[in-house]
Image: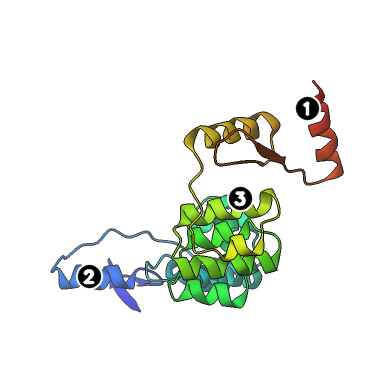
Amino acid sequence: MSYDLATRSYELIAGERRWRAHQLAGLAEIDVVVRQPRDEKHRMALTLIENLQRADLNPIEVALGYLRLMKEFGINQTALAEEVGKSKAAISNTLRLLELSDEIQKALQFAQITEGHGRALLGIDDPNLRHAVFQKVMADKLSVRETEALAREMEAGPVLEEELASDKKPAPKPADLRAIEESLQQSLGTKVVIRSKKNGAKGTIAISYFSFEDFDRLMKVLKK
């Protein structure tokens, strides 16, 4: 869409909905940002980025849009984050949703679960366990916090099938245990999960490591 302004010709490549809303409101002026695309490819990228800002897009549509931008226009996550005005971590978290199974992605697309649920499920590495937890989330309508708690339980150690199939929702972890977990994670620089019995007298502490070097580092810290 093109229009003349002060004898110069401009092309509207993003923001048409806002422009039409101003027209309907009877406003004669609108604030704009004038950009000069380097080429046709850059102009198309700007249009696609604008479409990704729409509120009605589901998380999978956004993730696929990010992936398309990166592939078609040869940019990495850092450059993409700058273009769309988000942090690199936010971009990475959204793209990781594409690692979920088709069934879970469809649940995200149809708003049966939220992006928070999806991120919690990504915390479970075993695809079979992840699917089992997803089914429990759907069946019991677990909240994001309940899903996160259950995912931590999965990663901390084996869970009996009858326990996972139970209709009972996972009990929220006490605030004092969560605080201790966070303190240990900051001290050790890695993921820490505490599991305790109902009376709190017994339990386990699971400390994660992600490489041989990480294991050696943790051993040195723990021996101090």
Query: For this rendering, which residue is in front, 49 or 56?
Result: 56
Residue at the spot of label 3 = 152
Distance between the alpha carbons at the discs numbered 2 and 1: 61 Å
Seen in the picture, residue 77 relative to 42 is either above or below; the reply is: above
Seen in the picture, residue 111 relative to 219 is either above or below; the reply is: below
Q: Residue at x 62, y 69 (%)?
A: 131
Q: In the rendered structure, which amino acid carries the disc numbered 3?
A: Arg
Residue at the spot of label 1 = 222
Distance between the alpha carbons at the discs numbered 1 and 3: 22 Å
Mark 3 and mark 2 lie on one chain; the one further toward the N terminus is 2
The part of the image, by quadrant, that contains residue 20 is bottom left
Mark toward the viewer: 3 or 2: 3
Across and down, in percent, residue 194 comes to 63, 40
State the SS at label 3: helix
Across and down, in percent, residue 209 comes to 77, 43
Q: How packed is label 3: few (under 14 Cα within 10 Å), some, or many (20 or more)?
A: some
Residue at the spot of label 2 = 21
Looking at the image, do the residues carrying marks 3 and 2 touch, with CB atoms under 8 Å apart? no
Q: In the rendered structure, which amino acid carries the disc numbered 2?
A: Ala
Seen in the picture, residue 219 relative to 87 is either above or below; the reply is: above
Mark toward the viewer: 2 or 1: 1
